[in-house]
């Protein structure tokens, strides 16, 4: 995903996008060119072009970071467009070094959000993982 994080036509608020992303199997790696400033925008229904009030003031940078973090990805930023290819190469390298762990939880409620934490025995190394899952 390549984005400046500024939402100009969605009909879902950021919180709903994050909820859908958390419930999916997608791993998101946003790549941003520069760091946009937080803004407050009118919220419109994209199909009907009707104003729906003001969006919550959400920093585009924070939204992209949370989206990446919650899906087990990472966010990348570069200040020069000439460096974009390098960021995408970093993402491919990271993806190639990932492992898939699965488990069958027991004794948890049949629905809702369930927090998980993945740790390495001995604490050496880097773990990038989802914060939980939706049942």
Image (cartoon, rainbow, N blue to C red):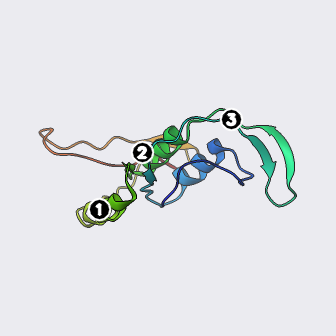
Q: Position of residue 64 (x, y in %)?
A: 49, 46
> In whole angstroms, how far apart are the C-alphas of marks 2 and 1?
21 Å
Q: Of label 2 and label 1, which has the lower sequence position? A: 2
Q: Residues within 10 Å of mark 3 (few under 14, many from 20)?
A: few
Residue drawn at point x = 39 percent, y = 55 percent: 104
Given residues 49 and 36, the one toward you in this image is 36
Q: Are marks 2 and 1 in contact (CB under 8 Å)?
A: no
Which tag is nearer the camera, tag 3 or tag 2?
A: 3
* Residue 43 to residue 83: above or below: above
Residue 135 seen anywhere in this rendered image of the structure: no
Residue drawn at point x = 30 percent, y = 66 percent: 92
Callout 2 secondary element? helix
**Residue 86 badge:** 1
Residue drawn at point x = 40 percent, y = 58 percent: 81
Callout 1 secondary element? helix
**Residue 69 badge:** 2
Residue drawn at point x = 63 percent, y = 42 percent: 15
Q: Of label 3 and label 2, which has the lower sequence position? A: 3
Q: Are marks 3 and 2 in contact (CB under 8 Å)?
A: no
Residue 115 picture quarter: top left
Which residue in the protein does label 3 denote? Answer: 40
Q: Residues within 10 Å of mark 1 (few under 14, many from 20)?
A: few
């Amino acid at each position: 995903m390549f984005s400046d994080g500024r939402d100009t036509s969605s009909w879902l608020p950021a919180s709903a996008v994050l909820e859908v992303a958390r419930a999916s199997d997608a791993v998101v790696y946003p790549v941003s060119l520069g760091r946009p400033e937080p803004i407050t925008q009118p919220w419109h229904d994209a199909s009907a072009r009707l104003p729906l009030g003001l969006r919550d003031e959400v920093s585009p940078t924070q939204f992209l970071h949370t989206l990446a973090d919650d899906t087990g990805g990472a966010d990348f930023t570069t200040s020069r467009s000439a460096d974009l290819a390098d960021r995408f190469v970093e993402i491919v390298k990271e993806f190639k070094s990932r492992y898939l762990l699965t488990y069958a939880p027991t004794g948890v409620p049949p629905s809702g959000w369930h927090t998980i934490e993945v740790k390495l025995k001995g604490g050496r190394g880097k773990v990038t993982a989802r914060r939980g899952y939706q049942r």
